Each structure stands twice: as structure tokens, then as C-alpha cells.
Amino acid sequence: MNAYVFPGQGAQFVGMGKDLYDNNAEARAMFERANEILGFRITDMMFEGTDEDLRQTRVTQPAIFLHSVILARTLGDEFRPDMTAGHSLGEFSALVTAGALDFEDGLRLVSARAMAMQKACELKPSTMAAVLALPDEKVEEICAAVPGIVVCANYNCPGQLVISGEIEAIDAACAAALEAGAKRALKLKVGGAFHSPCMEPARAELAAAIEATEFHTPVCPVYQNVDALPHTDPAEIKANLVAQLTAPVRWTQTVRNMIADGADRFIEIGPGKVLQGLVAKISRDVATEGRQ
């Protein structure tokens, strides 16, 4: 069974999507419509901007979403998902390609989410860090013991967990992780503490935008980050998208559940190869490939 997966923030690169724009009329029309909806030429930043331009949350999230969704559209009949999932932001790409959301509505929601998250980041200094080669349970213990806000945010694969929270708390947790035997505890270049209570100020804004948007029953199950389970009910999908903002991305559990439900081929759609690498670390028994 084919599981299509979609990357999240961090996969962006300058030049992403340019081949699609140059060589496919449908893709070009979708990119131009996106420029209209967003009110600025995101294509200029994607194709010819700087790394710094692309690192702005308000740009990064729509850019990755556009690359993934437009690429999936150009695959035509080749795109036949039995199930989909996306990492954080990638969940919106998964929902659009599975038919749960229209392209334009999906883009508006991604833009609203990015703006709300950027505002939340500016309210309180916060960050994220990757902890390598410690059991998840040990990292959870460390986070619980450190004063201040620090939580497990991304369960990426066995031995790779991202923590998120206030800067001082992250520093303390990184030091404790290294003392406990972590191979590395490395702060990430991100705008703030995504998937943590620090994103709570963005929640009401995103919830209002999601509630005002029409969702449909997808053509296949979409495995969502908050519980790593398959969903097809529009009301459940909406509630999980809101919860995702402050809850961890359970990617390890998601991939394992997809495999348990029959997935034996994972195809990553969008920029980079991050998810192919994570899937391979979660299970050696499945095939991985990508479309970029």
C-alpha cells in the first residue's frame, strides 16, 4: 500500500518549485493564484530569494505547502494514495492532496497559521533543540524535571527527539541530556518553540480560521500528528489541527501505525529528503522514495 508523506518546516531551499513553474502550465497557474491570495510574490522568494527570506515563518510554511501540493497535482494518475500523513505543517499538504481541503482554503489556513505562530514567537523568546541517542522516556523525564516551559515536541524517529520551550529551560534540558549520555543536544535555527505551550497565543486565531473553513471527507485516511491515528471525519480533523499547534508531532508512532495498517511504500512529496530518512530509521522493512 502507498503511503504519501509531506515534509514540514526546515525542508525549504532556494529554487524550490522553479522547475514546476517553468515547465508545467497548471503548476504556474497555481503558483500565480497563490501570489494573489497571499498578497505578495512568494514565488520570487522561493525561486530567487535568500536563505534568510525563506526562514521567515510567514514565508517558509506557505512555500513548503505550495511546493508539495502543486507537485502532487502535477503527478496526475501516478498519485494514488492509500493513506497520507504530514510532519507538522506537512499535515495541511496531506489533507489537501487527500481531498479534505481545497487548495485555496488550505493555503489561506497555512498562511493564517504561519502569521499566528510568528506573532506568538515574538511574544516570548523561545526555541527548539534536537536531542540525539537518548531513549524518548529519558528525554521526557528531563523535560519534566527542568524548571520553566520545555516539552518533547517532535518524536522524529528512535534516538531523535526535538524539545521545545523557553530558552533558559531548553539550555538546562540540553545540559541535562548531555550529562545523561546524549550524543548531541543541539539548538535549532527556528523562530520559536513550535508544538509547545508557548504557541498557546496562536491557538484562538488558528481555531477561528479552521472553524470558518469547509472541510470534506478525504479520499483516504489521513494520519494526524496529535494521536498518530487515521482520520476521515471532518470534525475530528479540524479539532486535531487546532490541537497540533501546542501538542507534539508523533511521527515515529504515525509511521509505525501506517505500517501496521498495511503501508509498505512511503513516497515523500515536496522539498528535501528528511522524511525518507526518518522512515528508514523507523523501519527497514518498507521502501522509501521521493518526488521533488
Image (cartoon, rainbow, N blue to C red):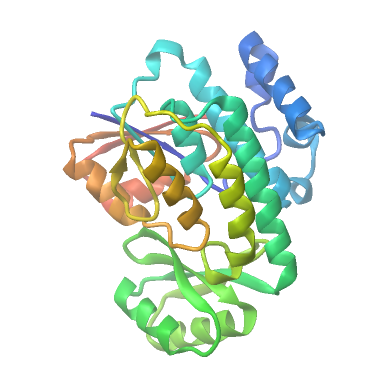
Residue 160, placed above or below residue 32: below
Residue 26, placed above or below residue 11: above
Q: Is residue 174 visible?
A: yes
Left or right? Give the position of 262 relative to 100: left
Q: Is residue 87 visible?
A: no
Q: Residue at x 61, y 40 (%)?
A: 109
- Relative image position of residue 104 (x, y in whole percent): 62, 27
Q: Name the quadrant of the N terminus.
A: top left
- Relative image position of residue 186 (x, y in whole percent): 55, 72
Quarter-of-image position of residue 161: bottom left
Total marks drawn? 0
Residue 164, placed above or below residue 118: below
Left or right? Give the position of 90 relative to 287: right
72 vs 116, nearest the viewer: 116
Q: Residue at x 69, y 15 (%)?
A: 29
- Relative image position of residue 91 (x, y in whole percent): 47, 42
Residue 126, placed above or below residue 233: below
Quarter-of-image position of residue 250: bottom left
Quarter-of-image position of residue 258: top left
- Relative image position of residue 114 (x, y in whole percent): 66, 49
Q: Residue at x 58, y 66 (%)?
A: 200
193 vs 128, nearest the viewer: 193
Q: Residue at x 34, y 20 (%)?
A: 80
